[in-house]
Image (cartoon, grey):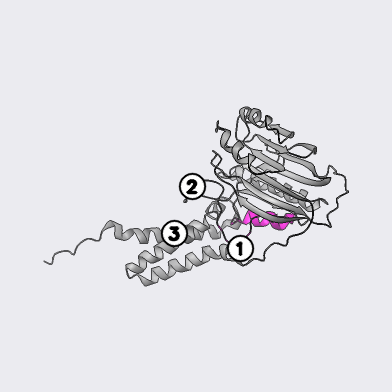
Amino acid sequence: MPRPGPRASPFARLPTLAFAIVGASSVLALFAPLGWPFELFSHFRPQYAASALVVAALLALQRRSAYAAAALVLAGWHAMPVAQRALAASPVLCEGTTFTVVTANLRYVNERPEPFLDWLDGQSADLVVVQEITAGWARALSRLPDYPYQYVLPRPDPYGIGVLSRWPLESVGTVDLAGDGLPSLSGFVRIEGQPVRFLGLHTPWPILPWLARSRDDALRRVAEIARTEDLPVVVLGDLNLSPDAPAFGRLLNDSGLRDVMHGPDWRPTWRARFWPLALRIDHVLVNDDLCVEHAEVGAPIGSDHRPVTARLQVRPQAVASAAPGDQGS
């Protein structure tokens, strides 16, 4: 009776298992336009691309050329959004009023404000929207001398929110964009006399279907407000939505807003130090009355999020003399 051959090492099967996982996740991501739960798989395309590339190399070493070729195809497909951003035309600069905005999720359980305050001190930001504001954070922010104009709504949960400004705020208040009881900010800021409409928000984490619907309802309302506003508009906040999700594309298409981030760089804002989960879910969006001079993801601030900074310019044709109205508030 012939002896059985040597058993293959369990580690030899790992590339095949990894290929199956990436492939299954890719198939599920294809159905992301249908919404939850498929959209959850669409956020991690940079991770899929890198993983598929590594898997292709391992399968090639095992002389499994068909599987290696399939893994390369997966890597190329998931890398397409990065290539598209790299090939996109550079934003056009314009001459007009220049100002800097920041959005930052401070993490409501973070009791050390110093890292964020020190970082903010070096930014010379004009308008700052902050999320996850507690009573302790509100006290720390109220002592900032460079931001005399503030509207802060602290809460004991992750949905406290606030705005800090060097310039006068007008008609600022909270608005329930999705009808779910969660506050967002709506108002106007006059920067050297130029009125700018801003919306600040923190949408729900879409891990469950009703939370995903609440987030999408808020984003639809944001799109409606931005589309009908005659002034420069800037939207800032933790949208719990990555650029690779179909809902992000719908938001931009329906609102006429643009993402201030440009170029091929992968710049996550959430879990940035933990590659498997790192995502860019904190955003600054602007309408066509604003040009983007520079945008970047900031340094660690003691939160699980990193801030986003954008230096903006008002286009000359934007109506500088218009008085802020209350539409969409």
Q: Name the residue under label 1.
A: 85
> Mark 1 belongs to which amino acid?
Arg
Give the quarter of the image for residue 38: bottom right
How crowded pointer 3 is (Cα within 10 Å; few <14, some 14-19, many 20+) is rated as: some
Residue 264 in the magenta stretch? The answer is yes
Q: Nearer the viewer, mark 1 or mark 3?
A: 1
How many other residues sit within 10 Å of disc 2, few (<14), some (14-19) or many (≥20)? Answer: few
Q: Mark 1 or mark 2: which comes first in sequence?
A: 1
Q: Can residue 322 be seen by looking at this rendering?
A: yes
How far apart, in angstroms, are the residues tagged by discs 1 and 2? 23 Å
Q: Residue at x 64, y 54 (%)?
A: 248
Q: SS of the residue at dot 2?
A: loop
Whole-percent x, y for residue 260 in the image: 67, 55
Upstream in sequence: badge 3 or badge 2: 3
Q: Which residue is drawn at 61% across and 57% down?
A: 33
Q: Which residue is drawn at 81% across and 45% down?
A: 192
Residue type pointed to by label 3 = Ser
Give the camera-side residue of 190 and 325.
190
Residue nearest the observer in this picture, 122 or 7:
122
- Percent coordinates x, y for residue 61 in the rendering: 33, 68
Give the magenta-colored segment's residue range: 243-265
The residue that disc 3 covers is: 51
Q: Is residue 238 left or right of residue 19?
A: right
Q: What amino acid does circle 2 point to?
A: Arg
Q: Residue 216 carries which label?
A: none
Residue picked out by circle 2 = 273
33 vs 165, left or right, is left
User: How far apart are the alpha carbons under marks 3 and 2?
Assistant: 17 Å
